[in-house]
Image (cartoon, rainbow, N blue to C red):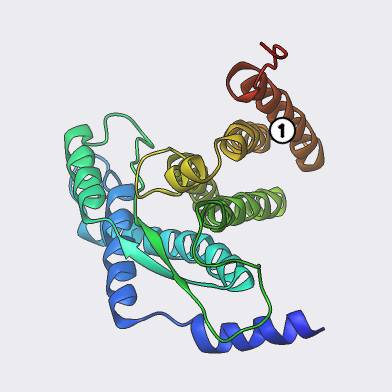
């Protein structure tokens, strides 16, 4: 009960976005929304009304996806005793824009989704949380992992909704979040994957294949529970393979 009260207090104090974060989020959302609606401004000829309508739908999809992703990291960060600050990645957004213009809609769903990363700030004055002397790499890795995990949960929710209400908007949201999750897991700074990889290579060896495999199974309409079980097994097998191949220290006895 004390942990719940402590978390509620942390959320009340530290969950809100700073003006700098809001500016970065708005820029990221509108740039990425433009990218994923780039080839939806008319079929044969340019259509402003159709383009604005599709851009509005894309803004809804991107805003929901980024905020859910960010919520996972903020909540887990507060549980661990950190305040998470969103940092827009300007170079990544510009690269994504250039790639969208270069592709010009020739390859559907070739989206580069790189809104940014995050910084951690150590919270003082709360007695509950992880025992730590400061920000450490493993704690940062666990906070980073919460983002793709919440994105996977959103994919599952959208997939369940699509069973009862099939629409292009929901299907596009599922595709967007699949690409978003996979790209965020790449070990490229400042993406989440880099923080997971440098925080714990063992954790990364399990998380990357397991989450990608689960996403693929869910997208191809495999049962959700079966997808999660199979992805867990795949993650364990590849984790063991990585451990045996790279991490295990073979003791040869006294020399």
Which quadrant of the structure image shows residue 143?
bottom right
213 lies above or below 191: above
Quadrant for the C terminus in the image: top right
Q: Is residue 244 left or right of residue 200?
A: right
Quadrant location, the N terminus: bottom right
> What residue is drawn where x is 33% and y is 57%?
33
The spot of residue 18 in percent (x, y) is: 35, 81
Q: Is residue 246 left or right of residue 25?
A: right
Which residue occupies the extreme front position in the image?
A: 255
**Crowdedness of circle 1 by 10 Å Cα count: few (<14), some, many (20+)?**
many
Residue positioned 59% across, 32% down in the render: 205
Query: So how many labels did they put on this image?
Result: 1
Q: Is residue 86 above or below residue 186?
A: below
- The quarter of the displayed image where residue 48 is located: bottom left
Relative to 90, is 240 on the left or the right? right
Q: Which residue is mark 1?
A: 231
Across and down, in percent, residue 218 comes to 67, 38
Q: Nearer the viewer, residue 35 or 227?
A: 227
- x and y, in percent, of residue 102 in the image: 17, 34
Residue at 50%, 83% (x, y): give it.
14
**Helix, strand or loop status at disc 1:** helix
- The structure residue drawn at horizontal position 74% and vertical position 81%, both measured from the top left corner, is 4
Q: In this orientation, which residue lies closer to the viewer: 95 or 10?
A: 10
């Amino acid at each position: 009960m004390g942990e719940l009260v402590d978390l509620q207090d942390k959320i009340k104090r530290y969950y809100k976005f700073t003006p700098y974060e809001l500016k970065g989020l708005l820029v990221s959302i509108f740039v990425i929304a433009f990218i994923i609606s780039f080839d939806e401004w008319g079929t044969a000829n340019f259509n402003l009304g159709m383009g604005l309508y599709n851009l509005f739908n894309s803004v809804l999809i991107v805003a929901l996806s980024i905020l859910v992703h960010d919520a996972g990291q903020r909540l887990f960060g507060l549980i661990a005793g950190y305040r998470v600050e969103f940092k827009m990645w300007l170079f990544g957004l510009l690269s994504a824009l250039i790639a969208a213009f270069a592709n010009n809609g020739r390859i559907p769903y070739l989206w580069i989704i790189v809104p940014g990363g995050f910084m951690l700030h150590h919270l003082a004055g709360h007695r509950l949380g992880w025992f730590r002397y400061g920000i450490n790499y493993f704690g940062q890795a666990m906070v980073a992992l919460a983002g793709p995990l919440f994105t996977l949960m959103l994919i599952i929710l959208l997939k369940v909704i699509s069973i009862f209400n099939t629409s292009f908007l929901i299907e596009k949201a599922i595709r967007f979040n699949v690409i978003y999750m996979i790209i965020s897991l790449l070990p490229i700074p400042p993406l989440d994957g880099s923080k997971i990889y440098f925080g714990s290579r063992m954790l990364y060896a399990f998380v990357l294949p397991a989450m990608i495999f689960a996403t693929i199974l869910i997208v191809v309409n495999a049962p959700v529970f079966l997808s999660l079980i199979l992805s867990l097994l795949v993650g364990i097998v590849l984790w063991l393979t990585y451990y045996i191949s790279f991490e295990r220290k073979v003791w040869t006895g006294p020399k």
